[in-house]
């Protein structure tokens, strides 16, 4: 199943400007996406069908694919496994529409192209109020996670909407908090232990400007060498009256060496203190963390995962 989400920030997003002169062509290619691995460079490119890939029932849609650009020097029978997401930039709200299915794709000499023939309907794309096409300019992007197999084995599993994946933390006496940061209790979700970390007055360069919020993996020391956990999660400050919550979705790899991720500029202190936003009611702030999906990579005898 293809899923669509809106995010305000995308890690290492590669942006490409569409040349309007190419719209009349059946398909056009963007500059190559270079993904560097330990022993070789994987060159890929985005291929756009601005009027739809009609050969794959894409009439009436924008079609976008990720394609191997150069396989020169690859050994016979080569295979490269990857998870990727495609993005369209909403230039009005400075957000990204994320399109993906979360599944591992196998690129090979037989099939070197993967993507979405019905990525976005032309009626939505061409509507200027949606922000995707502004002044004949649009921006597409891709985020690629390459799994390099050295022939010794790896196991990749995915859990969507893990059990217990939503946890709520009520921070009481918010105006009286004086420490630099605070931890929530530990929550069990997706067979792992998690906790939220709150900097009520901001962290690092955002101190005094923004509230900072992180999700931490509390049992990361149990990870064996080569194990990594890819997590799509949402951090949220609840509007306690109208449900106009402030939230941001983040996608990161957790490991023994990288056990927490979040945003130093999660929300401005001005917004927090604005009573009309209803974030602080009766001196209580409600923070939530939601695990949307988990992907576990267990590495057996030398296989490695490299993110670029």
Image: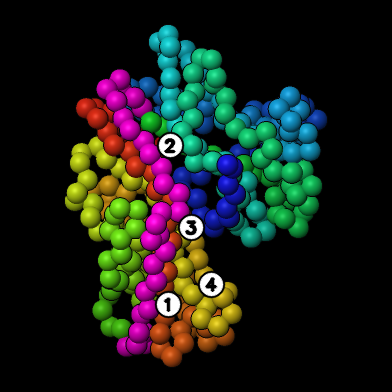
Q: Which residue is mark 3?
A: 249
Quadrant placement of the C terminus: top left
Q: CA distance from mark 4 to mark 1?
A: 10 Å
Q: Hey, which residue is sitting farthest front in the picture?
A: 163
Nearest-to-viewer mark from 3 and 1: 1
Question: Residue 18 at what x, y percent from top left?
Answer: 68, 38
1 or 2: tag closer to the N-terminus = 2
The image's mark for residue 286 is 1
* Image height of 278 relative to 97, above or below: below
Quadrant hosting residue 305 = top left
Of the residues tagged 1 and 2, which is closer to the observer?
1
Contact between marks 4 and 1 (CB within 8 A): the answer is no
**Percent from the top left, x then y, of residue 174?**
36, 84
Which numbered circle lies on residue 145?
Answer: 2
Quadrant in the rendering for residue 203: bottom left
Query: Residue 135's x, y, as percent?
Result: 76, 49
Q: Is residue 10 visible?
A: yes
Q: Which residue is mark 4?
A: 245
Alpha-carbon distance for marks 4 and 3?
13 Å
> Camera-side residue: 54 or 37?
54
Please provide the residue range marked out in magenta: 148-176
Q: Is residue 251 visible?
A: no
At x 63% / y 29%, what residue is drawn? 47
First in sequence, mark 4 or 2: give its number: 2
Where disc 4 sits, the SS reads loop
């Amino acid at each position: 199943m293809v899923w669509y989400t809106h995010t305000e920030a995308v890690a290492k997003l590669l942006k490409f400007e569409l040349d309007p002169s190419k719209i009349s062509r059946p398909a056009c290619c963007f500059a190559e996406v270079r993904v560097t691995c330990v022993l070789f460079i994987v060159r890929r490119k985005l291929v756009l069908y601005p009027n739809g890939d009609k050969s794959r029932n894409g009439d009436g849609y924008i079609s976008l694919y990720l394609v191997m650009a150069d396989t020169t020097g690859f050994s016979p029978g080569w295979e490269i496994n990857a998870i990727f997401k495609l993005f369209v930039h909403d230039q009005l709200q400075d957000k990204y529409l994320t399109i993906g299915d979360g599944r591992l794709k196998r690129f090979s000499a037989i099939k070197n192209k993967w993507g979405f023939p019905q990525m976005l309907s032309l009626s939505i794309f061409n509507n200027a109020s949606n922000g995707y096409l502004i002044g004949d300019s649009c921006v597409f992007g891709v985020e690629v996670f390459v799994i390099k197999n050295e022939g010794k084995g790896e196991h990749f599993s995915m859990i969507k909407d893990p059990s217990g994946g939503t946890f709520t933390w009520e921070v009481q006496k918010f105006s009286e908090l004086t420490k630099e940061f605070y931890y929530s209790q530990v929550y069990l979700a997706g067979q792992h232990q998690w906790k939220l970390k709150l900097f009520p007055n901001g962290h690092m360069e955002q101190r005094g400007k923004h509230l900072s919020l992180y999700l931490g993996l509390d049992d990361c020391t149990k990870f064996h060498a080569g194990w990594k956990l890819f997590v799509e999660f949402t951090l949220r400050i609840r509007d306690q009256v109208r449900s106009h919550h402030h939230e941001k979705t983040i996608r990161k790899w957790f490991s023994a060496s990288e056990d927490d991720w979040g945003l130093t500029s999660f929300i401005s202190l001005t917004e927090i203190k604005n009573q009309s936003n209803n974030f602080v009611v009766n001196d209580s702030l409600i923070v939530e963390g939601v695990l949307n999906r988990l992907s576990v990579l267990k590495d057996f005898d030398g296989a490695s995962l490299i993110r670029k």
